[in-house]
Amino acid sequence: MKLLVDKVMQEGIVLSDHVLKVDSFLNHQMDPVLMREVGKEFTRLFAQEKITKVLTIESSGIAPGIMTALELNVPLIFARKHKSLTLKDNIFVEKVYSFTKRETNEITVSKKFLAENDRVLIIDDFLANGEAAFGLARIVEQAGAHVVGIGIVIEKAFQPGGRLLAEAGYHVESLVRIASLENGTVTLA
Ligand code: 5GP
């Protein structure tokens, strides 16, 4: 995806050897035209999968998630990171260690929205150690549903998430893979 690669290279801000800030198009301000293209690309990559739901995690997964769900014509569910007063019982819960916040969150999804016959595509903005993606996959599996794949907008390929997810048998597709953030520079894989 040239459009996305160009954005990452032109607007990505290297905060450290491990963290990239992309708040001009994904993590704060969001670029809807770019997100629409991201949705089309995930739809193309997982075209054979008969997807029934897209699952992501709030908040930065919602933009790529909803555009993918729109393209696939299925609902988007986003896991909540904070307990909602209206979401108390009948929930799937998993613990996820947050890479950027350095704390463990309990992520939740209502049991109402996932069923055994669902074929779920997981979408997230970044892949680092795989904590968020594994947590979302465990929620799908708690429901007895099937994870058809994991779509990542930006994978930091120098961190182990991509390898760990592949070793666990998941089909992972990342639209941009970063080999290194060393010396304040984004180097693509
Ligand atoms: P993981 O769970 O794979 O360790 O990390 C992925 C999650 O942490 C994503 O949901 C994303 O929100 C956040 N994240 C990880 N690395 C980065 C990064 O370099 N930049 C930003 N903006 N978020 C990141």
Image (cartoon, rainbow, N blue to C red):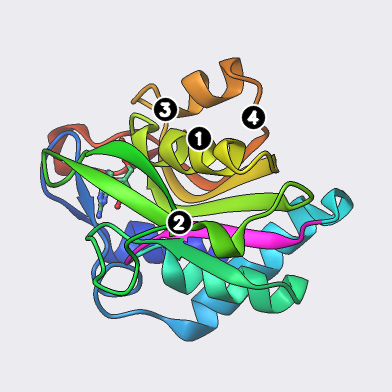
Mark 4 residue type: Tyr
Residue that badge 4 annotates? 170
Q: Secondary structure at mark 1?
A: helix
Q: Which residues are magenta?
A: 51-59
- Distance of mark 3 from mark 4, alpha carbons? 11 Å
As for residue 35 lying within the magenta part, the answer is: no
In this rendering, is residue 143 above or below 153? above
- Distance of mark 2 from mark 1, alpha carbons? 16 Å
Ligand 1 contact, mark 2 (Cβ < 8 Å) = no
The numbered mark at residue 138 is 1
Q: Nearer the viewer, mark 4 or mark 1?
A: 1
Count of picture labels: 4
Depth check, front residue: 163 or 85: 85
Q: Are marks 4 and 1 in contact (CB under 8 Å)?
A: no
Few, some or many C-alpha atoms within 10 Å of disc 4 (few <14, some 14-19, many ≥20)?
some
User: In the orientation shown, which residue stands out farthest toward the top?
Assistant: 167
- Distance of mark 3 from mark 2, alpha carbons? 30 Å
Residue under the image location 32 percent in, 62 percent down = 88
Q: Nearer the viewer, mark 3 or mark 4?
A: 4
As for residue 54 lying within the magenta part, the answer is: yes
* Quadrant position of the N terminus in the picture: bottom right
Q: Secondary structure at mark 3?
A: helix
